[in-house]
Amino acid sequence: MSSTPSPDAAARHRIGIYDQGEPGPTILVMSALHGNEPAGFRAFERVYERLLADKTPFRGRLVGFVGNLTALDKQQRFIDEDLNRIWQPGDIARRAAIPWEERSSEGRQQAELLAALEGELGQASNEPIYFLDLHTSSAQGKPFVCIGDTLRNRNFATQFPVPVILGLEEQVDGAMLEYVNNLGHVTVGVEAGQHDDPTSIDFHEAFVSLALVGTGCVHRNDLSCYNEMRARLDAAGASLPRVLEVRHRHPVSAADDFQMRPGYENFQPVKVGEELAQDARGAVQAPETGRVLLPLYQGQGDDGYFLVREFAKFWLAVSALLRRLKLGRCARWLPGVHVHHGDANTLVVNRGVARWFTVEIFHLLGYRKERSDGDQLLFSRRVEDF
Ligand SMILES: [Zn+2]
């Protein structure tokens, strides 16, 4: 009984490689981790075909991937389980031990993707690896990018003239972006708009095109469409805040019968107490004033909506400074804080002692909140700050 994917099955997830043998960074573009999100896949094809047609000079390597092939075929988010929620290292190891024939559809897709990615992520090189994960959503809305908050991710993400969201990855466990980020690479998640809106393909095309230049793989003057692509995102991001942080996630399950009220879009301002949705228990109200992100208007999915709030430039600068000074290393000396006995990079915070602004302070120092454990909060230090 086999427990590994065939080389052919892995190769089907690679949709294009552009490499002229010149040393340079690697850009990996992931599309359709969710099968009802074909826009990223289409956009990569456009960019790839333009590079081939123009014979664009290129330093480094570009590889496009398609995530959930079986779900893409059926035009649904997933078959058995969400392929973008099963990337915690323990999960991956557990799934790899299951005989091939007994795995879920996504368990097999994951193994194929890992095999397809292996050669790209495993290469020993001093050149950086950039990972873009392209998504769309069920609601209409302005495009944005989201990152795990490391300085390298910030530097790369803020090149795109659209809002950058911090902290989305803390709200969902097992996202592929976080897995690749924890391998030490630069990672950016991209949300381009509504699943079937043709402009979502246009925006993804613009993100990937700007990434070619932003990574230094392509010189701006060699990309014929650069100005057009830049203008496309400039227009989309105009009048929106540059950096926002997630303040709240509204989780839903099928039993909740969650119904978002019609008409909400990404970044739409809402007031505390505003009725955003109805569920089995009645009205769902905004717990604080902010902006709505990713309101749920489809059957599958377990995030009802997120609330985000502008993150002031001042605090961005403060946290960059704290991290350059490596003050995160001193966090273990704060009262109520100790190092996790099993993992030197995880801190356990006693909420009874460290009472105020705990999460905010640890964010500033470059930690990711892992979970709440009764009176304790667990934070892990991000790879880059080791
Ligand atoms: Zn998605």
Image (spheres, helix red, strand yellow):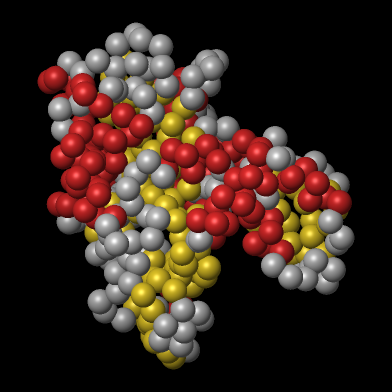
In this rendered view, identify the residue nearer to me: 31 or 290. Answer: 290
How many marks can you see? 0
For this rendering, which residue is in front, 129 or 154?
154
Looking at the image, which is closer to me, 167 or 90?
Answer: 167
Point 15% across, 52% down: residue: 198
Left or right of 358: which side holds 132? left
Q: Quadrant of residue 283?
A: bottom left
Q: Is residue 168 at all visible to an observer of this figure? A: no
Which quadrant of the view contains residue 55? top left
> x%, y% of residue 90?
64, 43
**Quadrant, the C terminus:** top right
Which residue is painted at 44% across and 56% down in the image? 243
Q: Residue furthest left?
A: 53
As displayed, is residue 218 above or below residue 254?
Answer: above
From the viewer's perspective, tell me whether residue 146 is left or right of residue 124: left
Residue shown at 74%/70% (left/top)? 356
Q: Residue at x 55, y 52 (%)?
A: 316
Percent x, y of residue 11 = 34, 24
Residue 212: x and y, percent?
31, 29
**Nearest the eye: 217 or 107:** 217
The residue at the far top in this view is 21
Left or right? Give the position of 196 relative to 145: left
Q: Residue furthest bottom?
A: 282
Residue 203 seen in the current view: yes
